[in-house]
Structure formats: structure tokens, C-alpha cells
Amino acid sequence: MQQVDVAVVGAGVIGLAVALELRSRGLSVAVADKSDPVREASWAAGGMLAVDDPENPAPLWPLSAWSRELYPEFLARIEQQSALSVPIRTHRALQGSHEGSSSLEALNTLKEIGLSPEGHAWALQVEGSLDPRDLGAALQAACANTDVSIRSHCAIDTLARDGAGWRLQSGSGDILAYRVVLCTGSWAGPGNLPVFPRKGQMMAVEMDAPLDTVVRTPEIYLIPRGDGRVVIGATIEDAGYDKTVHSADIAALKARAVKLFPPAAQAPIVETWAGLRPATHDGMPLIGAIEEGLYAATGHYRNGIQLAAATARAIGLQLSGEPLPVDMQAYAVNRTFGPVFAQPS
Ligand code: GLY
């Protein structure tokens, strides 16, 4: 049996970022994952730090903006603790919308990189992107180097109060923790949290044409990794926990990308994959106390990478009983959900 100050359930980017934040506050931390660390939504994500994407629900903005502010320090600390680099791979994004008009600088950038305007209004945004697999590797190494234990293939079967803390029972031994943070992504997990998966199919292509800008419309995005690979995504599907990649869906995505960026026609597909976004019924994450000593940090839907910095800090401040600079009511676990999404059929 392992005894720690805090047990984190779920070793995705959110779980590991939370674990490191709590460790930096002097707490002993164990992270349990039902399979391998950072292999679900964190591994599948695009990695756009898309604070100003007009598709984001408006109440997300204060949390996103706070996370943007924290991000440089968040990454620098992970890089220092892991001795691994997490490079920012792009520094700007062309955002296409169905409404409004294009800015002159956006139109000039479109022309410069050979993009077809494709019936959208365009804006040029200052925004970064990273490869979430770089971040996942660095987070794991940072945990190893700071004495945060990650227990892989350790599904938590039951979570029950035990004295002043909690007992987490698993087939590979129990964990006794004073506090627990549930970062279980698309899985309701031992807290039976109101989250559900929304599937995204994606691909990476290899391109000769230089592209140094994220291109995003409500229908598609292209994310250059700075090494010739460009990630193209993504479908949004209610398909339960199915992660099958369908060649017809990939072909349709590629055709859409080619319409926007004709040089993509010649680009061979080098990888395809699908991931499960942890969605909630109002599009906002669940961050904060469920009951005394039990917290959630999940449901980040399309923005888990971008929101990791603020989510980890928010949990750190809440566990320490310190005030937060952002009103967290829109993300509270006990809020009443207003419907934003169509329910999965
Ligand atoms: N964050 C990109 C996506 O959800 O597809």
C-alpha cells in the first residue's frame, strides 16, 4: 500500500501538470492511470494554444487568458525539471470565420503562404502551438525527476473515505491519500463525473511547401510542426469510445485541407490517428472541489493542452486554500449545465 498526501487519478497532460504543481508545493504525490501515461486525448491533441478561437464558448475566456499568461513559466519549469525541450512550433494563426470581414494583414499573410480564402473572413492571431507528444514526454520525465510516482495500468476500482483521507483500491495495490484529484478525461472514473467522449480523427502529412502558420476554420485546421510535418484535423463525432480511423473520413479531411491550401494535394499522409476529447454538456471543464478532500480537473474538451497551466495552478491554489485570480464558478463541478452540444445519439 502506498501512502501519499495527494493521489491524482489519470496521467494525461492535465493529471501530470496537476501532480507537478502539487509536488512544487511540497506535497507527496502519486498518479494512477488505467493504462499508459499521456496516451489518450493528450497524445491525440493538435496542440494549438488557441485562446482566441471564436469557436470556444465565451465563459472559457478568463481561464484561457490566465493559462496563456502562465504558459511561459509553466513550460520553462517542465523543461528545467525534465531536461527536455518543448518547443513552440508556430507563433501565429490564421483564423477563418463565417462572419465578419478579413483584415488586411490576414489577407497579406494568406497571399504570402499561398492559401485560398475559401469564402471565409480571416484574422491573423498571435498564438503558439506545440507538439503535445513533446509535452507528454517532458511531463513524464519531470515527474520521474521530482519524485512523483506514476503507476501505469493501475485502474482505480473503488474510491472510499478512509479516516481523514481516501482509499483508492486497485488490482495492483491500494493507495491511501489525504486528498484526491480526478483527472480522468473522457472516462467518468471513480467520481462518476459528467463527461463523455467526442471522437476526432486526424492525420499528419509531410510537406515540401513551407508553412509556418496555423490555419484554422470552423471545419478544419492545419498545424505545421516546423519539421515538414503538418497535422490536419479533425472530425468531431459522438462515437462512444471507438477510436477507429476510417479512410473515407481521412480522405474527406484531406480534400478540405487541399481546397484551403492547394500544395497539400501532393503531401503524403505519414500518420493517421483518432482521439477522444473529454466533453461536458456545456463545453466548460470541471475544475474544483467535489466534496471535502476530493477534486476534479477534467472535461477540457478541445483545449486541454492550452488550459493545463491554469488548471494545475487552480488546483494548487484551491488545495492550499489560497484565493484564485479568476472566478471559477463557470467551471465548478456542481454547476447546473446549460445545453450547448447536441446530446450524443
Ligand atoms: N483541439 C483540437 C481539436 O479538438 O480537434
Image (cartoon, helix red, strand yellow):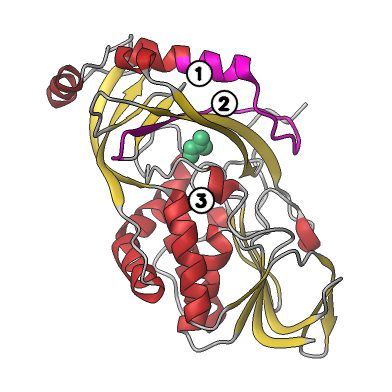
Q: Is residue 327 visible?
A: no
Q: Nearer the viewer, mark 3 or mark 1?
A: 1
Whether residue 23 sits left or right of residue 29 in the image: it is left
Observer-nearest of 161 and 94? 94
Observer-nearest of 282 and 26? 26
Label pair 2/1, CB-CB below 8 angstroms: yes
- The image quadrant where one finds the N terminus is bottom right
- The image quadrant where one finds the C terminus is top right
User: Which residue is found at the position 42% from the left and 55% from the top?
Assistant: 134
> Is residue 147 placed above or below 233 in the rendered structure?
below
Give the residue pinned by disc 3: 304
Give the residue pinned by disc 1: 253
Whether residue 171 sits left or right of residue 78 in the image: it is right
Q: Which mark is residue 317?
A: none
Give the residue pinned by disc 2: 235
- What secondary structure is marked by label 3? helix
Amino acid of disc 1: Leu
Q: Is residue 142 visible?
A: yes
Q: Residues within 10 Å of mark 2 (few under 14, many from 20)?
A: some
Label pair 2/3, CB-CB below 8 angstroms: no
Q: Residues within 10 Å of mark 3 (few under 14, many from 20)?
A: many
